[in-house]
Protein backbone atom coordinates (compact mmCIF):
# COMPACT_ATOMS: atom_id res chain seq x y z
CA UNK A 1 0.00 0.00 0.00
CA UNK A 2 1.28 3.51 -0.85
CA UNK A 3 2.20 5.63 2.15
CA UNK A 4 1.34 9.35 2.05
CA UNK A 5 3.50 11.42 4.38
CA UNK A 6 1.98 14.60 5.79
CA UNK A 7 3.57 17.77 7.06
CA UNK A 8 1.78 19.95 9.59
CA UNK A 9 2.22 23.57 10.62
CA UNK A 10 0.75 24.02 14.11
CA UNK A 11 0.01 21.53 16.87
CA UNK A 12 -2.54 23.32 19.04
CA UNK A 13 -6.19 22.42 19.63
CA UNK A 14 -6.88 21.45 16.00
CA UNK A 15 -3.38 20.13 15.19
CA UNK A 16 -3.46 17.70 18.11
CA UNK A 17 -6.92 16.55 17.00
CA UNK A 18 -5.60 15.93 13.48
CA UNK A 19 -2.60 13.93 14.76
CA UNK A 20 -4.89 11.87 17.02
CA UNK A 21 -7.35 11.14 14.17
CA UNK A 22 -4.60 10.14 11.72
CA UNK A 23 -3.38 7.64 14.32
CA UNK A 24 -6.72 6.38 15.69
CA UNK A 25 -8.63 6.22 12.39
CA UNK A 26 -5.76 4.82 10.32
CA UNK A 27 -7.75 1.74 9.23
CA UNK A 28 -10.75 3.73 8.00
CA UNK A 29 -8.51 6.23 6.21
CA UNK A 30 -6.60 3.51 4.36
CA UNK A 31 -9.85 1.66 3.54
CA UNK A 32 -11.29 4.84 1.99
CA UNK A 33 -8.18 6.13 0.21
CA UNK A 34 -6.27 2.93 -0.47
CA UNK A 35 -3.22 4.63 1.07
CA UNK A 36 -1.58 4.59 4.45
CA UNK A 37 -1.34 8.11 5.95
CA UNK A 38 1.31 9.15 8.45
CA UNK A 39 2.34 12.51 9.88
CA UNK A 40 6.06 12.91 9.28
CA UNK A 41 7.06 16.47 10.27
CA UNK A 42 5.33 19.11 12.42
CA UNK A 43 6.41 22.74 12.60
CA UNK A 44 5.65 24.54 15.88
CA UNK A 45 6.96 27.58 17.72
CA UNK A 46 7.83 25.80 20.98
CA UNK A 47 9.02 22.22 20.36
CA UNK A 48 9.77 21.84 24.08
CA UNK A 49 5.99 21.95 24.77
CA UNK A 50 5.32 19.00 22.45
CA UNK A 51 7.82 16.42 23.68
CA UNK A 52 4.97 13.89 24.17
CA UNK A 53 4.91 13.38 20.38
CA UNK A 54 8.64 13.81 19.77
CA UNK A 55 9.06 10.05 19.32
CA UNK A 56 6.21 9.83 16.79
CA UNK A 57 6.82 12.85 14.54
CA UNK A 58 9.77 15.06 13.64
CA UNK A 59 9.27 18.40 15.44
CA UNK A 60 10.83 21.47 13.88
CA UNK A 61 10.72 25.25 13.96
CA UNK A 62 11.93 25.48 10.35
CA UNK A 63 9.51 25.47 7.42
CA UNK A 64 12.48 24.52 5.23
CA UNK A 65 12.37 21.02 6.78
CA UNK A 66 8.94 20.55 5.18
CA UNK A 67 9.58 22.53 1.98
CA UNK A 68 12.73 20.61 1.11
CA UNK A 69 11.34 17.16 1.92
CA UNK A 70 10.27 15.45 -1.34
CA UNK A 71 8.43 12.75 0.65
CA UNK A 72 5.93 15.31 1.97
CA UNK A 73 3.28 16.00 -0.66
CA UNK A 74 0.53 17.36 1.54
CA UNK A 75 0.70 19.87 4.41
CA UNK A 76 -1.95 20.81 7.00
CA UNK A 77 -1.84 24.48 8.09
CA UNK A 78 -3.38 24.85 11.56
CA UNK A 79 -1.25 27.66 12.96
CA UNK A 80 -3.98 30.36 12.58
CA UNK A 81 -3.76 34.11 11.99
CA UNK A 82 -3.11 35.91 8.71
CA UNK A 83 0.67 36.49 8.94
CA UNK A 84 2.86 34.52 8.64
CA UNK A 85 0.26 31.84 7.70
CA UNK A 86 -0.24 33.48 4.28
CA UNK A 87 3.50 33.43 3.52
CA UNK A 88 3.77 29.85 4.81
CA UNK A 89 0.98 28.64 2.47
CA UNK A 90 2.44 30.58 -0.46
CA UNK A 91 5.81 28.91 0.03
CA UNK A 92 4.18 25.48 0.36
CA UNK A 93 2.18 25.93 -2.86
CA UNK A 94 5.23 27.21 -4.76
CA UNK A 95 7.05 24.09 -3.55
CA UNK A 96 4.15 22.06 -5.14
CA UNK A 97 2.78 20.85 -1.81
CA UNK A 98 -0.99 20.40 -1.53
CA UNK A 99 -2.45 22.34 1.40
CA UNK A 100 -5.35 21.76 3.79
CA UNK A 101 -6.13 24.67 6.10
CA UNK A 102 -8.61 25.53 8.88
CA UNK A 103 -7.81 29.24 8.71
CA UNK A 104 -10.95 31.36 8.15
CA UNK A 105 -9.20 34.70 8.80
CA UNK A 106 -6.72 33.95 6.03
CA UNK A 107 -9.11 32.38 3.51
CA UNK A 108 -11.72 35.14 3.98
CA UNK A 109 -9.03 37.78 3.42
CA UNK A 110 -6.69 36.24 0.83
CA UNK A 111 -8.65 33.22 -0.46
CA UNK A 112 -8.78 34.55 -4.00
CA UNK A 113 -4.99 34.98 -4.33
CA UNK A 114 -4.21 31.68 -2.59
CA UNK A 115 -6.69 29.73 -4.76
CA UNK A 116 -5.12 31.31 -7.84
CA UNK A 117 -1.62 30.38 -6.67
CA UNK A 118 -2.74 26.81 -5.93
CA UNK A 119 -4.15 26.45 -9.43
CA UNK A 120 -1.01 27.89 -11.04
CA UNK A 121 1.02 25.26 -9.21
CA UNK A 122 -1.45 22.42 -9.96
CA UNK A 123 -2.01 21.99 -6.24
CA UNK A 124 -5.13 21.34 -4.16
CA UNK A 125 -6.04 23.94 -1.54
CA UNK A 126 -8.94 22.89 0.69
CA UNK A 127 -10.33 24.51 3.82
CA UNK A 128 -13.56 22.78 4.92
CA UNK A 129 -12.67 23.30 8.61
CA UNK A 130 -12.54 27.09 8.19
CA UNK A 131 -16.35 27.36 8.44
CA UNK A 132 -18.46 25.81 11.21
CA UNK A 133 -15.75 23.40 12.49
CA UNK A 134 -17.12 19.86 12.24
CA UNK A 135 -20.09 20.64 9.96
CA UNK A 136 -19.29 19.61 6.35
CA UNK A 137 -20.91 22.73 4.90
CA UNK A 138 -18.49 23.93 2.20
CA UNK A 139 -18.28 20.61 0.36
CA UNK A 140 -22.08 20.28 0.67
CA UNK A 141 -22.56 23.67 -1.01
CA UNK A 142 -19.86 23.06 -3.64
CA UNK A 143 -20.97 19.50 -4.50
CA UNK A 144 -24.54 18.82 -3.39
CA UNK A 145 -25.92 22.26 -4.34
CA UNK A 146 -23.86 22.41 -7.53
CA UNK A 147 -26.89 22.73 -9.82
CA UNK A 148 -29.33 24.58 -7.57
CA UNK A 149 -29.47 28.37 -7.31
CA UNK A 150 -28.85 29.22 -3.68
CA UNK A 151 -30.89 32.27 -2.68
CA UNK A 152 -29.88 32.56 0.98
CA UNK A 153 -27.38 31.15 3.44
CA UNK A 154 -27.77 32.12 7.05
CA UNK A 155 -26.81 30.71 10.34
CA UNK A 156 -25.14 30.59 13.71
CA UNK A 157 -21.46 30.27 12.84
CA UNK A 158 -19.77 31.31 16.08
CA UNK A 159 -19.99 28.99 19.08
CA UNK A 160 -18.65 31.46 21.66
CA UNK A 161 -21.35 34.06 21.04
CA UNK A 162 -24.06 31.41 20.79
CA UNK A 163 -22.99 30.04 24.18
CA UNK A 164 -23.10 33.55 25.72
CA UNK A 165 -26.52 34.43 24.24
CA UNK A 166 -27.95 31.04 25.25
CA UNK A 167 -26.84 31.58 28.85
CA UNK A 168 -28.17 35.16 28.85
CA UNK A 169 -31.54 33.81 27.70
CA UNK A 170 -31.76 30.76 29.94
CA UNK A 171 -30.05 31.99 33.13
CA UNK A 172 -31.07 35.67 32.77
CA UNK A 173 -27.41 36.66 33.11
CA UNK A 174 -25.82 39.91 31.96
CA UNK A 175 -23.47 39.81 28.96
CA UNK A 176 -20.46 40.27 31.28
CA UNK A 177 -21.46 37.35 33.56
CA UNK A 178 -22.18 35.04 30.62
CA UNK A 179 -18.80 35.91 29.02
CA UNK A 180 -16.96 35.13 32.28
CA UNK A 181 -18.72 31.76 32.51
CA UNK A 182 -17.86 31.01 28.85
CA UNK A 183 -14.19 31.80 29.58
CA UNK A 184 -14.20 29.59 32.70
CA UNK A 185 -15.56 26.65 30.68
CA UNK A 186 -13.22 27.17 27.72
CA UNK A 187 -15.95 28.28 25.28
CA UNK A 188 -14.42 31.78 25.03
CA UNK A 189 -10.76 32.75 24.70
CA UNK A 190 -9.00 35.04 27.18
CA UNK A 191 -9.20 37.72 24.44
CA UNK A 192 -12.67 37.14 22.94
CA UNK A 193 -12.64 40.28 20.74
CA UNK A 194 -12.87 38.56 17.33
CA UNK A 195 -15.81 36.45 18.51
CA UNK A 196 -17.90 38.98 20.45
CA UNK A 197 -17.51 41.78 17.87
CA UNK A 198 -18.82 39.48 15.11
CA UNK A 199 -15.54 39.50 13.13
CA UNK A 200 -15.07 35.73 13.28
CA UNK A 201 -18.65 35.17 12.05
CA UNK A 202 -18.06 37.75 9.30
CA UNK A 203 -15.00 35.81 8.03
CA UNK A 204 -17.12 32.66 7.81
CA UNK A 205 -19.96 34.47 6.01
CA UNK A 206 -17.46 35.79 3.43
CA UNK A 207 -16.42 32.20 2.65
CA UNK A 208 -20.01 30.88 2.72
CA UNK A 209 -21.09 33.64 0.34
CA UNK A 210 -18.24 32.84 -2.08
CA UNK A 211 -19.36 29.21 -2.20
CA UNK A 212 -23.12 29.93 -2.29
CA UNK A 213 -23.27 32.84 -4.73
CA UNK A 214 -19.89 32.71 -6.47
CA UNK A 215 -19.22 36.15 -5.08
CA UNK A 216 -18.54 37.87 -1.78
CA UNK A 217 -17.89 41.23 -0.16
CA UNK A 218 -14.72 42.06 1.78
CA UNK A 219 -14.70 42.81 5.50
CA UNK A 220 -15.60 46.49 5.87
CA UNK A 221 -18.02 46.40 2.92
CA UNK A 222 -20.94 45.01 4.95
CA UNK A 223 -22.40 45.64 8.41
CA UNK A 224 -20.98 43.58 11.26
CA UNK A 225 -22.49 44.03 14.74
CA UNK A 226 -21.37 41.85 17.64
CA UNK A 227 -23.05 40.90 20.89
CA UNK A 228 -20.91 43.00 23.24
CA UNK A 229 -23.63 45.67 23.55
CA UNK A 230 -26.55 43.27 23.98
CA UNK A 231 -28.63 44.11 27.09
CA UNK A 232 -30.23 41.45 29.29
CA UNK A 233 -33.49 43.47 29.13
CA UNK A 234 -33.67 43.01 25.33
CA UNK A 235 -32.96 39.26 25.54
CA UNK A 236 -35.82 38.99 28.09
CA UNK A 237 -38.22 41.12 26.03
CA UNK A 238 -37.39 39.14 22.88
CA UNK A 239 -38.55 36.02 24.78
CA UNK A 240 -41.77 37.78 25.86
CA UNK A 241 -42.47 38.61 22.21
CA UNK A 242 -41.87 34.92 21.29
CA UNK A 243 -38.31 35.15 19.95
CA UNK A 244 -34.77 34.06 20.85
CA UNK A 245 -31.85 36.46 20.33
CA UNK A 246 -29.05 34.93 18.21
CA UNK A 247 -25.98 36.25 16.40
CA UNK A 248 -26.98 35.50 12.81
CA UNK A 249 -24.79 35.62 9.73
CA UNK A 250 -27.12 36.46 6.86
CA UNK A 251 -26.12 36.35 3.17
CA UNK A 252 -28.79 36.49 0.46
CA UNK A 253 -29.58 37.57 -3.04
CA UNK A 254 -31.78 40.66 -3.27
CA UNK A 255 -32.84 41.54 -6.84
CA UNK A 256 -29.83 39.57 -8.13
CA UNK A 257 -27.50 41.60 -5.93
CA UNK A 258 -25.59 40.44 -2.86
CA UNK A 259 -26.47 41.30 0.73
CA UNK A 260 -24.33 40.17 3.68
CA UNK A 261 -24.71 41.09 7.34
CA UNK A 262 -23.72 39.77 10.76
CA UNK A 263 -25.94 41.05 13.58
CA UNK A 264 -27.86 40.09 16.71
CA UNK A 265 -31.23 38.94 15.38
CA UNK A 266 -34.56 37.92 16.90
CA UNK A 267 -35.38 34.41 15.71
CA UNK A 268 -38.97 33.20 16.17
CA UNK A 269 -39.09 30.41 18.80
CA UNK A 270 -40.44 27.89 16.25
CA UNK A 271 -37.64 28.54 13.72
CA UNK A 272 -35.02 25.72 13.51
CA UNK A 273 -32.18 28.18 14.25
CA UNK A 274 -33.89 29.16 17.55
CA UNK A 275 -33.24 25.67 18.94
CA UNK A 276 -29.46 25.77 18.27
CA UNK A 277 -28.04 26.33 21.74
CA UNK A 278 -24.74 26.79 23.56
CA UNK A 279 -21.56 26.25 21.52
CA UNK A 280 -23.30 24.53 18.61
CA UNK A 281 -23.47 25.94 15.08
CA UNK A 282 -26.06 25.61 12.33
CA UNK A 283 -26.19 26.81 8.75
CA UNK A 284 -29.44 27.08 6.80
CA UNK A 285 -29.00 26.94 3.03
CA UNK A 286 -32.00 27.87 0.90
CA UNK A 287 -31.98 26.70 -2.70
CA UNK A 288 -34.48 27.69 -5.37
CA UNK A 289 -35.23 24.04 -6.16
CA UNK A 290 -34.61 22.29 -2.83
CA UNK A 291 -36.04 24.92 -0.42
CA UNK A 292 -34.67 25.20 3.14
CA UNK A 293 -31.99 22.77 4.36
CA UNK A 294 -30.28 22.82 7.75
CA UNK A 295 -26.77 21.68 8.71
CA UNK A 296 -26.20 21.38 12.47
CA UNK A 297 -23.28 20.34 14.66
CA UNK A 298 -20.23 21.33 16.68
CA UNK A 299 -18.69 24.49 15.24
CA UNK A 300 -15.33 24.13 17.01
CA UNK A 301 -13.18 21.86 19.17
CA UNK A 302 -10.15 19.71 18.40
CA UNK A 303 -11.72 16.49 17.14
CA UNK A 304 -14.82 17.96 15.40
CA UNK A 305 -12.60 20.41 13.48
CA UNK A 306 -10.04 17.66 12.78
CA UNK A 307 -12.87 15.62 11.19
CA UNK A 308 -13.24 18.31 8.54
CA UNK A 309 -9.46 18.55 8.08
CA UNK A 310 -9.28 14.77 7.60
CA UNK A 311 -12.12 14.83 5.06
CA UNK A 312 -10.05 17.32 3.04
CA UNK A 313 -6.93 15.16 3.44
CA UNK A 314 -8.75 12.09 2.12
CA UNK A 315 -10.07 14.10 -0.85
CA UNK A 316 -6.57 15.32 -1.73
CA UNK A 317 -5.22 11.77 -1.46
CA UNK A 318 -7.95 10.48 -3.78
CA UNK A 319 -7.04 13.28 -6.22
CA UNK A 320 -3.35 12.31 -5.95
CA UNK A 321 -4.17 8.68 -6.71
CA UNK A 322 -6.41 9.62 -9.64
CA UNK A 323 -3.96 12.35 -10.76
CA UNK A 324 -6.72 14.97 -10.64
CA UNK A 325 -5.15 17.50 -8.28
CA UNK A 326 -5.12 21.22 -9.05
CA UNK A 327 -8.89 21.78 -9.28
CA UNK A 328 -10.44 24.55 -7.23
CA UNK A 329 -12.35 23.62 -4.06
CA UNK A 330 -15.07 26.06 -5.18
CA UNK A 331 -15.42 26.58 -8.90
CA UNK A 332 -18.50 28.83 -8.81
CA UNK A 333 -17.76 32.45 -9.66
CA UNK A 334 -20.24 35.16 -10.57
CA UNK A 335 -19.89 38.95 -10.45
CA UNK A 336 -22.54 40.44 -8.13
CA UNK A 337 -22.97 44.06 -7.06
CA UNK A 338 -23.82 44.81 -3.41
CA UNK A 339 -27.56 45.18 -2.71
CA UNK A 340 -28.86 48.71 -2.25
CA UNK A 341 -30.11 49.57 1.31
CA UNK A 342 -33.44 50.63 -0.20
CA UNK A 343 -34.15 47.09 -1.41
CA UNK A 344 -33.25 45.02 1.68
CA UNK A 345 -36.43 44.70 3.77
CA UNK A 346 -36.90 43.04 7.14
CA UNK A 347 -38.94 43.34 10.30
CA UNK A 348 -37.12 44.96 13.24
CA UNK A 349 -37.16 44.87 17.01
CA UNK A 350 -36.58 48.38 18.34
CA UNK A 351 -35.64 49.10 21.95
CA UNK A 352 -36.08 52.74 22.98
CA UNK A 353 -35.66 54.79 26.13
CA UNK A 354 -37.85 57.88 26.42
CA UNK A 355 -39.19 60.25 29.08
CA UNK A 356 -42.44 59.01 30.63
CA UNK A 357 -44.49 62.17 29.97
CA UNK A 358 -47.24 63.36 27.63
CA UNK A 359 -46.24 64.08 24.04
CA UNK A 360 -43.28 61.64 23.78
CA UNK A 361 -45.33 58.83 22.25
CA UNK A 362 -46.57 61.35 19.64
CA UNK A 363 -42.94 62.16 18.76
CA UNK A 364 -42.23 58.45 18.43
CA UNK A 365 -45.17 57.80 16.11
CA UNK A 366 -44.25 60.88 14.02
CA UNK A 367 -40.66 59.60 13.63
CA UNK A 368 -41.97 56.13 12.74
CA UNK A 369 -44.30 57.64 10.12
CA UNK A 370 -41.43 59.63 8.56
CA UNK A 371 -39.34 56.48 8.44
CA UNK A 372 -42.24 54.60 6.83
CA UNK A 373 -42.31 52.18 9.81
CA UNK A 374 -45.38 50.71 11.47
CA UNK A 375 -45.92 48.74 14.70
CA UNK A 376 -46.68 45.05 14.84
CA UNK A 377 -46.21 44.74 18.64
CA UNK A 378 -45.38 47.37 21.30
CA UNK A 379 -44.67 47.17 25.04
CA UNK A 380 -43.86 49.92 27.53
CA UNK A 381 -42.19 48.95 30.80
CA UNK A 382 -42.81 50.87 34.04
CA UNK A 383 -40.63 54.01 34.13
CA UNK A 384 -37.51 54.16 36.28
CA UNK A 385 -36.32 57.67 37.23
CA UNK A 386 -38.81 59.17 34.75
CA UNK A 387 -37.41 57.16 31.80
CA UNK A 388 -39.50 54.39 30.24
CA UNK A 389 -38.25 51.54 28.08
CA UNK A 390 -40.39 50.94 25.01
CA UNK A 391 -39.93 47.87 22.85
CA UNK A 392 -41.45 47.50 19.40
CA UNK A 393 -41.61 44.93 16.65
CA UNK A 394 -42.18 46.64 13.32
CA UNK A 395 -43.68 45.47 10.06
CA UNK A 396 -41.23 45.13 7.14
CA UNK A 397 -39.07 48.14 6.44
CA UNK A 398 -35.96 48.67 4.34
CA UNK A 399 -32.44 49.47 5.61
CA UNK A 400 -32.88 52.95 4.11
CA UNK A 401 -36.15 53.45 6.04
CA UNK A 402 -34.47 52.22 9.24
CA UNK A 403 -31.68 54.79 8.75
CA UNK A 404 -34.30 57.56 8.29
CA UNK A 405 -36.13 56.41 11.42
CA UNK A 406 -32.87 56.38 13.45
CA UNK A 407 -32.07 59.93 12.26
CA UNK A 408 -35.62 61.13 13.12
CA UNK A 409 -35.38 59.60 16.60
CA UNK A 410 -31.97 61.22 17.18
CA UNK A 411 -33.48 64.58 16.16
CA UNK A 412 -36.10 64.34 18.94
CA UNK A 413 -33.21 64.62 21.45
CA UNK A 414 -35.40 62.87 24.06
CA UNK A 415 -35.97 59.42 22.53
CA UNK A 416 -32.92 57.14 22.51
CA UNK A 417 -32.75 54.15 20.17
CA UNK A 418 -30.89 51.53 22.23
CA UNK A 419 -30.85 48.92 19.49
CA UNK A 420 -32.54 47.86 16.26
CA UNK A 421 -32.35 44.10 15.72
CA UNK A 422 -33.61 42.29 12.63
CA UNK A 423 -36.41 39.74 13.13
CA UNK A 424 -36.62 36.42 11.26
CA UNK A 425 -39.55 34.01 11.19
N1 LIG B 1 -9.86 25.71 17.90
C1 LIG B 1 -10.93 25.43 17.18
O1 LIG B 1 -11.91 24.89 17.69
C2 LIG B 1 -10.98 25.80 15.73
C3 LIG B 1 -12.15 25.52 14.97
C4 LIG B 1 -12.17 25.81 13.60
C5 LIG B 1 -11.05 26.39 13.01
N2 LIG B 1 -9.95 26.68 13.78
C6 LIG B 1 -8.80 27.30 13.12
O2 LIG B 1 -7.72 26.38 13.20
C7 LIG B 1 -6.49 27.08 13.28
C8 LIG B 1 -5.73 26.60 14.51
O3 LIG B 1 -6.48 26.86 15.67
P1 LIG B 1 -6.06 26.26 17.10
O4 LIG B 1 -7.20 26.55 18.01
O5 LIG B 1 -5.61 24.86 16.94
O6 LIG B 1 -4.83 27.20 17.47
P2 LIG B 1 -3.81 27.04 18.70
O7 LIG B 1 -4.35 26.07 19.69
O8 LIG B 1 -3.50 28.42 19.15
O9 LIG B 1 -2.51 26.39 18.04
C9 LIG B 1 -1.69 27.07 17.14
C10 LIG B 1 -0.48 26.20 16.83
O10 LIG B 1 0.29 26.83 15.80
C11 LIG B 1 1.63 26.97 16.22
N3 LIG B 1 2.13 28.24 15.69
C12 LIG B 1 1.56 29.46 15.81
N4 LIG B 1 2.33 30.40 15.20
C13 LIG B 1 3.40 29.74 14.70
C14 LIG B 1 4.54 30.15 13.97
N5 LIG B 1 4.74 31.42 13.64
N6 LIG B 1 5.42 29.20 13.62
C15 LIG B 1 5.24 27.89 13.94
N7 LIG B 1 4.17 27.45 14.63
C16 LIG B 1 3.27 28.36 14.99
C17 LIG B 1 1.63 26.94 17.72
O11 LIG B 1 2.89 26.43 18.15
P3 LIG B 1 3.26 26.22 19.72
O12 LIG B 1 2.33 25.15 20.21
O13 LIG B 1 4.65 25.77 19.69
O14 LIG B 1 3.05 27.55 20.37
C18 LIG B 1 0.46 25.98 18.01
O15 LIG B 1 0.92 24.65 18.03
C19 LIG B 1 -6.86 28.56 13.29
O16 LIG B 1 -6.82 29.07 11.98
C20 LIG B 1 -8.30 28.56 13.79
O17 LIG B 1 -9.04 29.69 13.35
C21 LIG B 1 -9.90 26.41 15.11
Image (spheres, rainbow, N blue to C red):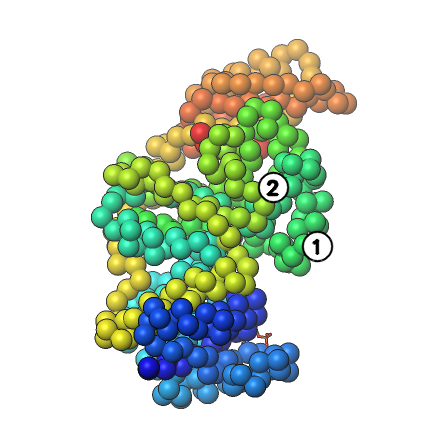
Which residue is nearer to you in this view: 178 or 225? 178
Q: Residues within 10 Å of mark 1 (few under 14, many from 20)?
A: few
Q: On the rendered image, what quadrant is the C terminus found in?
A: top left
Q: Dot 1: what SS?
A: helix
Q: On the rendered image, what quadrant is the N terminus found in?
A: bottom left
Q: Quadrant of residue 97?
A: bottom left
Which residue, given by chain and number where applicable, does mark 2 sit on?
165
Q: Residue at x 52, y 23 (%)?
A: 393
Q: Dot 2: what SS?
A: helix
Q: Earlier in the sequence, mark 1 or mark 2?
A: 2
Q: Is mark 2 within 8 Å of ligand 1?
A: no
Residue 120 visible, this angle = no
Q: Residue at x 52, y 86 (%)?
A: 58
Residues marked 1 and 2 touching at CB (< 8 Å) = no
**Mark 1 and mark 2: span between their CA atoms?**
16 Å
- Residue 305, given in percent of the width and then of the height, sits at 49, 61
Residue 184, numbered label: 1
- Residue 72, given in percent of the width and then of the height, sits at 39, 83
Q: Quadrant of ligand 1?
A: bottom right
Q: Residues within 10 Å of mark 2 (few under 14, many from 20)?
A: many
Q: Quadrant of residue 28?
A: bottom left
- Residue 237, given in percent of the width and then of the height, sits at 62, 27
Residue 394 visible, this angle = yes
Residue situated furthest top in the rendering: 358
- Residue 94, given in percent of the width and then of the height, sits at 34, 79
Which residue is nearer to you in this view: 88 or 296? 296
Amino acid sequence: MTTIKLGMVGLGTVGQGVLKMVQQHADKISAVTGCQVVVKTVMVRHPERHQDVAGVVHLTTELADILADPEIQLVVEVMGGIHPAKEVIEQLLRAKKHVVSANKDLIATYGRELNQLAQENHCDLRYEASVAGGIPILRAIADSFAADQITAVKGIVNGTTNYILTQMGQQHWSYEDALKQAQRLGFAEADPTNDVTGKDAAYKMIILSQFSFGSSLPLGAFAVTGIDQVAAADVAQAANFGYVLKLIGDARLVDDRLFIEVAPTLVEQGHPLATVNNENNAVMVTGQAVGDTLFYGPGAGGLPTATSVLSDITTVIKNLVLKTTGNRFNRYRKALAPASPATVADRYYLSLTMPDRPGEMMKLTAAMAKGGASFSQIVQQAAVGGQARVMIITHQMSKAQLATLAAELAATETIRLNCAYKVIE
